[in-house]
């Protein structure tokens, strides 16, 4: 595969064969994998074959192999001749990150971190098939979750109305239709609200270790030395089933509409088709489920901190900074050839990075730009960045979403044999609790790219600017 260097942080796969646009990958030479052996680069090329794709098939520096699209992939399609592809959203619809700030100085409560992690582990069900944070939802209640998102949780006392202001889309996509969600998906989700799941999902206690943009950090409520909380999870079994259901539908749609692509995992349907409409309605429902899930987890986490730190709510100062989604498709207006155009933007393992002045940003942040939340692996660090106008011009207002895997889960398990992973985390100053050793081995820091190098690409390319760096001190995993 031919790769051309555009600048030190951007590479291009020239348009050839059936590609409708070039491919572009944000990376340094050191982060860029061998194009002869890296399947994710071939996936960037494959995505460029989608009908109606605009400008480029894009990939962020945390790119790695995924289903159809690479994880870290971004693609926008036109309404009139474009398509929607579930592979461009992923199985964990609206997997996302929520960052909560506190007014508690880490140095004043350092000895209580083990107690807090224990409380979090006991309060929030984690692991494969985890359930029981709230009673099993009836079909009527589940319909309300699917259609109302975060608001459903707030109405039941999980958090407050102000949280909606600081959640992407206010925690709800209005296009959701419960009827588009299968009974199997509903059944899988009925016991999983308020649960973490497994894999790379986590709850993390961090100390804000370095501030890069003081004015922006102050606007976001981030103070150096204070504790913060990251919550990373998605739509659990409901979202997985929605994706699975509609991949079958899209396979039939490909044959029906005569769409031919180099990879069947890119199964898609024209945006104007009934198949696309129903998928988008079900996807929106799964996204709303994920927002409600994170809203409930946040409320449970606040109680765990209050109990573990033995503080009052006023002393804790638990406040949502922002909630962003990573796996989603949305209709957005972007400037193409000097004119605004509504596009369907697929972001899979990528997050929005909207610039100052954008109406989609909470008013309190509009002067500065949207918070971009980039969790790393559980042993090194995470970042808060801010979106830029260059992101809107080059990446449809998109940024990376994490460190990105460098080892598969199988490879990580092999690499972990004979090691005391919990002891290694203690040596790093991290209190770790998990339902089993396997997930820890699969998600160990060695399995991921260097988060500092990944974020460096995004900043040096002008896509987002660093606001703050956080260091983990406590982690809960499934």
Image: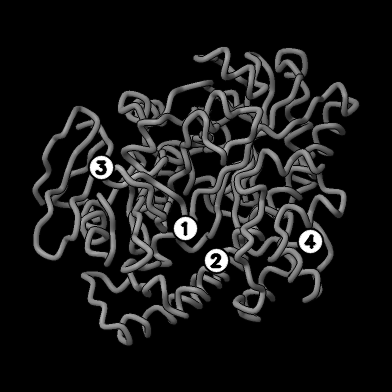
Instruction: Check disc 3 and report its element: helix, strand or loop.
Output: strand
Kindly tell me whether residue 106 is visible in this rendering.
yes
- Mark-to-mark CA distance, 1 and 2: 8 Å
Residue tagged by mark 4?
Answer: 132
Among the two numbered marks 3 and 4 on one chain, the one whose residue lies closer to the N terminus: 3
* Disc nearest the viewer among 3 and 4: 3
In the image, which is nearer the foreground, mark 3 or mark 2? Answer: 2
Residue depicted at 77% across the width and 38% down the height: 162
201 with respect to 156 (left or right): left
| The image quarter in which residue 430 lies | top right
Where residue 104 appears, as percent x and y from the top left, is 76, 19
Q: Which residue is mark 2?
A: 283
Which of discs 1 and 3 lies nearer the camera? The answer is 1
SS of the residue under disc 1: strand
Task: Tell me, yes or no, if residue 406 can be seen here.
Answer: no
Residue at the spot of label 3: 25
């Amino acid at each position: 595969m031919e790769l051309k260097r555009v600048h030190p942080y951007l590479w291009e796969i020239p348009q050839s064969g059936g590609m409708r646009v070039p491919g572009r990958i944000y990376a340094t030479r050191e982060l860029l994998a061998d194009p002869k052996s890296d399947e994710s680069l071939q996936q960037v090329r494959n995505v460029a074959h989608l009908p109606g794709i605009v400008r480029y098939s894009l990939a962020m520096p945390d790119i790695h192999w995924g289903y159809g699209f690479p994880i870290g992939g971004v693609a926008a399609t036109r309404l009139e001749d474009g398509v929607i592809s579930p592979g461009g959203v992923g199985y964990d619809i609206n997997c996302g990150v929520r960052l909560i700030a506190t007014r508690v100085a880490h140095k004043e409560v350092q000895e209580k971190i083990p107690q807090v992690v224990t409380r979090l582990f006991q309060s929030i069900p984690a692991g494969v098939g985890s359930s029981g944070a709230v009673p099993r939802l009836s079909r009527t209640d589940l319909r309300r979750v699917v259609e109302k998102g975060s608001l459903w949780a707030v109405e039941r006392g999980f958090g407050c109305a102000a949280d909606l202001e600081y959640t992407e889309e206010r925690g709800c996509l209005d296009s959701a239709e419960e009827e588009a969600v299968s009974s199997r998906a509903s059944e899988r989700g009925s016991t999983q609200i308020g649960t973490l799941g497994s894999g790379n999902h986590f709850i993390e206690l961090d100390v804000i270790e370095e501030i890069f943009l003081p004015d922006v950090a102050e606007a976001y409520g981030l103070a150096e030395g204070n504790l913060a909380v990251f919550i990373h999870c998605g739509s659990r079994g409901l979202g997985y089933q929605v994706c699975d259901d509609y991949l079958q539908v899209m396979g039939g749609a490909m044959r029906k509409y005569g769409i031919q692509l180099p990879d069947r995992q890119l199964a898609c349907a024209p945006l104007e088709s009934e198949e696309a409409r129903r998928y988008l309605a079900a996807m929106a429902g799964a996204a709303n489920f994920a927002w409600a899930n994170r809203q409930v987890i946040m409320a449970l986490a606040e109680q765990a901190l209050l109990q573990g730190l033995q503080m009052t709510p006023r002393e804790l100062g638990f406040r949502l900074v922002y909630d962003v989604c990573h796996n989603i498709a949305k209709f957005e207006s972007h400037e193409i050839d000097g004119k605004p155009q509504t596009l369907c933007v697929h972001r899979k393992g990528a997050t929005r990075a909207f610039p100052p002045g954008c109406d989609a940003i909470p008013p309190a942040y509009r002067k500065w730009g949207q918070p971009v939340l980039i969790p790393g692996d559980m042993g090194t660090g995470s970042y808060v960045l801010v979106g830029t106008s260059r992101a809107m011009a080059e990446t449809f207002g998109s940024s990376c979403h994490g460190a990105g895997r460098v080892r598969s889960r199988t490879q990580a398990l092999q690499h972990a044999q004979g090691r005391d992973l919990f002891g290694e985390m203690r040596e790093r100053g991290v209190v770790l609790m998990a339902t089993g050793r396997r997930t820890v081995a699969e998600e160990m820091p060695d399995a991921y790219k260097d988060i500092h190098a990944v974020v460096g690409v995004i900043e040096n390319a002008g896509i987002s600017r660093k606001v703050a760096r956080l260091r983990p001190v406590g982690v809960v995993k499934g």
